[in-house]
Image: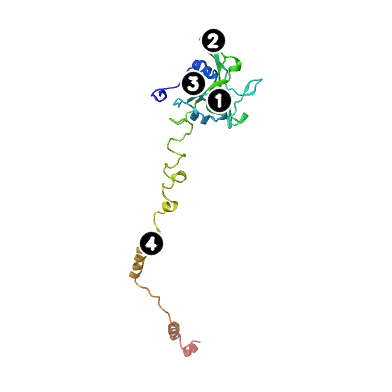
Amino acid sequence: MMNNRVGYRFSPTEEELINYYLKNKILGNNWLVDDAISEINIYSCDPKSLPSLSKIESNDLVWYFFCRNEYISTKQRVRKRTTVSGFWKATGRDRTIKDKGGEIGMVKTLVYHKGRGLKGVRTTWVMHEYHITCLPLDQRTYVVCKIKYSGDDFPSGGNEVGSIPSGGNEVGSIPSGGNEVGGIFPSGGDVSSDLCPFSVSDLNSIAAPTITEMDIHQQSLPSVQTPVVDSNTVRAANFEKMYKLLQNLPSVEIQEKLK
């Protein structure tokens, strides 16, 4: 197919978007345009999910979608531009699209904001919304939305911001092939055998020589016996000390003479 050729880009001009794609979609010639541009409710999706809904993959971070005109108020022709997590806010002036000197349509520029109202945070998602003006008002049932990501952190080769490379199930997941969550346990094995690769008999065979070696080591150590102290021995030692002390004392007669 043409989409797979090297250097192929789906990059229609503004005139082609309105005068060919949008006009044929409105007139019911879907077979001319549906193979290139998907029809979705763009305001029911967060921008980060839009690239995966595109018919044609894009390395230029630009995607195209058909979307029906939805109005909150048909009298005032106020369009619905809110999503689940934010809203598209118009910026700048509407611009007229001409072909061969005549007006065929107009384009509105919108920027996506997260949140609601004044607390909305501006993002780097931009939409160019193309309207046809060369058909009667009641036939202008579709618009073409050109979605562009203008940030610098979009992964190369991916169709979605933060998308996971093919072959992985989760961010930081272990390669597939496991039966458990994240592929922790090898396929085909039960939990107990995967966590402990040794059986009970293996553990006994490993522990047996270790115990024997400890016994041999203890037996090779020299035996140390605690001496037993007899009470008679203690009394004899004390008596000997007292006898030597009395021998050193002067006799009674000498003590009386010293007086």
| Residue type for callout 2 | Gly
- Residue highlighted by disc 2: 102
> Residue 219: which quarter of the image?
bottom left
Q: Residue at x 40, y 25 (%)?
A: 4
> Residue 114's spot in the image, x, y percent?
57, 31
Whole-number angstrom distance, CA of label 1 to CA of label 3:
31 Å
Whole-number angstrom distance, CA of label 1 to CA of label 4:
70 Å
> Residue 22's spot in the image, x, y percent?
53, 18
In what element is the residue under mark 4?
A: helix
Looking at the image, tell me whether mark 1 or mark 3 is earlier in sequence order: 3
Dot 1 alpha-carbon crowd within 10 angstroms: few under 14, some 14 to 19, many 20 or more: some
> Residue 185's spot in the image, x, y percent?
43, 48
In what element is the residue under mark 1?
A: strand
Looking at the image, tell me whether mark 1 or mark 2 is earlier in sequence order: 2
- Residue highlighted by disc 3: 31
Using the image, tell me which numbered label, if any, was put on residue 111: 1
- Residue highlighted by disc 4: 204
Looking at the image, tell me whether mark 4 or mark 3 is earlier in sequence order: 3
Of the two numbered discs 4 and 3 in the rendering, the one whose residue sits closer to the viewer: 3
Using the image, determine if residue 179 lies above or below residue 49: below
Quadrant including the N terminus: top left
In what element is the residue under mark 3?
A: helix
Q: Residue at x 59, y 17 (%)?
A: 139
Of the two numbered discs 1 and 2 in the rendering, the one whose residue sits closer to the viewer: 2
Whole-number angstrom distance, CA of label 3 to CA of label 2:
27 Å
Looking at the image, tell me whether mark 1 or mark 4 is earlier in sequence order: 1
Dot 2 alpha-carbon crowd within 10 angstroms: few under 14, some 14 to 19, many 20 or more: few
